Amino acid sequence: MRKFVLAAAVATSALGLAACGETADAVGETGDAMAADAASIADDATAAAEEGAAAAGEAAGDAAAATEEAAGDAAAAVEGAADEAAANAEAMVDGE
């Protein structure tokens, strides 16, 4: 009878250890999957940040080009107005 009780205790312990081993494997696999997911999320975030930086740089370049064009247009307008004022002043002097 003692042998049966002892065998049952050993069998129960063996099953418990096997279950713990499987649980540890499952936990390890879950940890690996979580680490892979975290790495994927980090890669996606990095890619999004790089795309955002590229878009911001492009927008800044476009803004600089537009500003330069507007400044050129303004300078041309001022020059035209100055030429017209000089012509008017000369006409007034000639007309006196």
Image: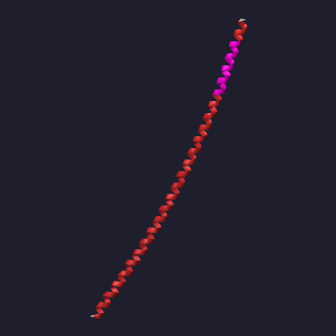
Q: Nearer the viewer, residue 4 or 67?
A: 4
Residue at x-position 71% and y-position 12%: 7
Q: Quadrant of the C terminus?
A: bottom left
Q: Quadrant of the N terminus?
A: top right
Task: Assess whether residue 75 is covered by the magenta stretch.
Answer: no
Residue 50, horizontal then vertical, whole percent: 54, 53
Q: Is residue 3 left or right of residue 55?
A: right
Residue at x-position 35% and y-position 81%: 82
Q: How is the image coloured?
A: secondary structure
Dominant secondary-structure state across the stretch colored magenta: helix
Residue at x-position 51% and y-position 55%: 53
Residue 94, horizontal then vertical, whole percent: 30, 93
Query: Measured along the vertical axis of the image, is residue 84 above or below residue 55?
Result: below
Residue 48, horizontal then vertical, whole percent: 54, 51
Residue positioned most to the left? 96
Query: Measured along the vertical axis of the image, is residue 62 above or below residue 36?
Result: below
Q: Is residue 54 left or right of residue 6?
A: left
Residue positioned most to the top? 1
When asked about the image quadrant of residue 6, the answer is top right
Tally the marks: 0
Q: Which residues are magenta?
A: 8-23
When asked about the image quadrant of residue 18, the answer is top right
Task: Assess whether residue 12 is covered by the magenta stretch.
Answer: yes
